[in-house]
Amino acid sequence: MRIIIIGAGKVGYNLALNLSKENHDVTVIDNDQEALHKAEENLDVLCIKGNGVSTNILIEAGVKETDLLIAVTDSDEVNMVCCLTGKKLGVLSSIARIRDPEYAHELTMLKEEVGIDMVINPEHAAADEIARSLAFPTAANVESFAKGRVKMIEVKVTEDMPIAGIKLKDLSNKNLHPILIGAVVRNDEVIVPDGDFQVQVDDNIYILGNPSGIMNFFRGWNQSLKKIRNVMIVGAGRITYYLTKMLYEMGIKVKILEIDREKCDEFAELLPNTLIINGDGTDEELLLSENIGDMDLFISLTGMDEENLISALIAKQSGAKRVISKISRINYMGVVTKLGIDSVICPKIITTNQILRYVRGNSIETLYRIVEGQAEILEFIPKGDSKIINIPLKKLKLPKSVIVATIVRKNQIVIPHGDDIICKDDRVIIIIKNNKISDLDDLVSISTGGIHNELQNGIKKLGDIINM
């Protein structure tokens, strides 16, 4: 696919990185020579210096032969004009980053009038991800599949969890509720476990199942699911705005700390039912005076990664029951989790996942990437002519890098075994490592060996010729 990305900032660079890895033909447009130089030096992309709104620049980038234009500059208005211009010049599809809350109620009209095929709002998506995780206070991340009927939660195994040291096949005998531990991250490596796999302390495990089954699973292991009632947020940005409105609807009290007086005044008008405090979120004395130790949840959402880390660490040491921090730099992710922060949110990664799902095609309902794409959890709805329907899973001979994790058939949720089959219109959730697929039928080519199998056959033929 030919793709033009307008904007070489953090989001644009990360998109170019991941799309070029999936062998798309990517062109990046930006006015900032330094940003373009970074992309040109590190990525397999074509870089063009100029204004993405310019007709001449878009024509130079080959917009008429382009499949997808993605506008992710810092200006919502520029992004919309880029998409409109691109559509007029012949691009097939367009995606715009639109973040201003004032546009949130007008997105349907904007998409129709401007010709935008997909709108991404990283801040709203990040707020939604945080809000979803509150149902499982011990979870680092929560993702919904099958329209909420299946949840995927990421949990770090601690010494007080009886699950540590148990083989997965023994765990299934003790658990009455259908759940699946589909992936494990150990020392930054993703493992697709089998029944003999033994869970260890400090593993990050990915559990799939229906919400009630997962909750009962945790209760069975004496893990607390205490409801969150009091939240403190540092930083009055867009994520905070969206999240506070969501939490208010959930009946959760929110206290916001913001160092900028003008932002405090603005948020006091936007969120009249929320306590806004003008102060430095990295000031330990201030946090203690605001009873940080009594908070069920502390979230650092400023625009500076360093400030977010400092305030999150102070909150953790001061007794906050759970701590979430926003991080913009992906290379910080591993360091942050080792510092004891319970969960990390990265709008850039959320945006990339949304766009990769769109680029892969309409057959993917949901896409969630683990450890920078080492593994993926995907949801598909198979069509009637699919090659894998009505065949027992054990006969598909899927490689060890693939797990059919869950099958949702109407209101029935199945953790499948070898004799189960996939039917037309099922919602199928799979976990796959070290492969990228766009359709369920792609599993057949993986299971038959793909390039690896062709290479083996070629070597075998060469041996036959030599022995003749």
Image (spheres, rainbow, N blue to C red):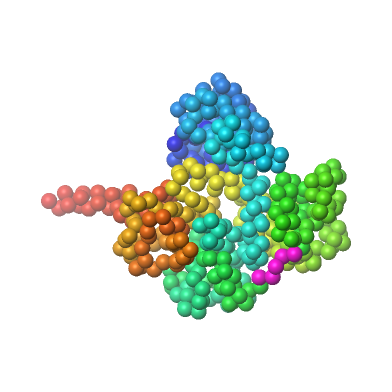
Residue at figure coordinates x 56%, y 73% from the top left: 217
The residue depicted at 83 percent of the width and 59 percent of the height is 287
Q: Residue furthest bottom?
A: 174
Q: Observer-nearest residue: 259 or 77?
A: 77
Q: Is residue 47 above or below residue 289?
A: above
Q: Is residue 70 visible?
A: no
The location of residue 334, given as percent across then percent down, is 61, 56
Above or below — where is 107 with respect to 377? above
How many labels, in total? 0
Q: Nearer the viewer, residue 60 or 105?
A: 105
| Residue 191 placement (x, y as % from top left) | 48, 62
User: Which residues are the magenta region?
Assistant: 225-229
Residue 339: image quadrant is bottom right
- Kindly identify the residue that appears in the image at 74 percent across and 61 percent down: 251
In the rendering, at what x and y percent does residue 66 appear?
47, 30
Q: Is residue 227 magenta?
A: yes
Above or below: residue 22 compared with residue 222:
above
> For residue 424, which quarter of the picture?
bottom left
Quadrant location of the N terminus? top left
Foreground residue among 191 and 231: 231
| Residue at image point 57% right, 42% down | 14
- Residue 141 appears in the picture as rendered: yes
Q: Position of residue 134 (x, y in %)?
A: 66, 62
Residue 134: in magenta span: no
Q: Is residue 167 left or right of residue 249?
A: left
Q: Main secondary structure of the magenta part?
A: loop
Q: Is residue 251 left or right of residue 84?
A: right
Q: Residue placed farthest to the left in the image?
A: 468
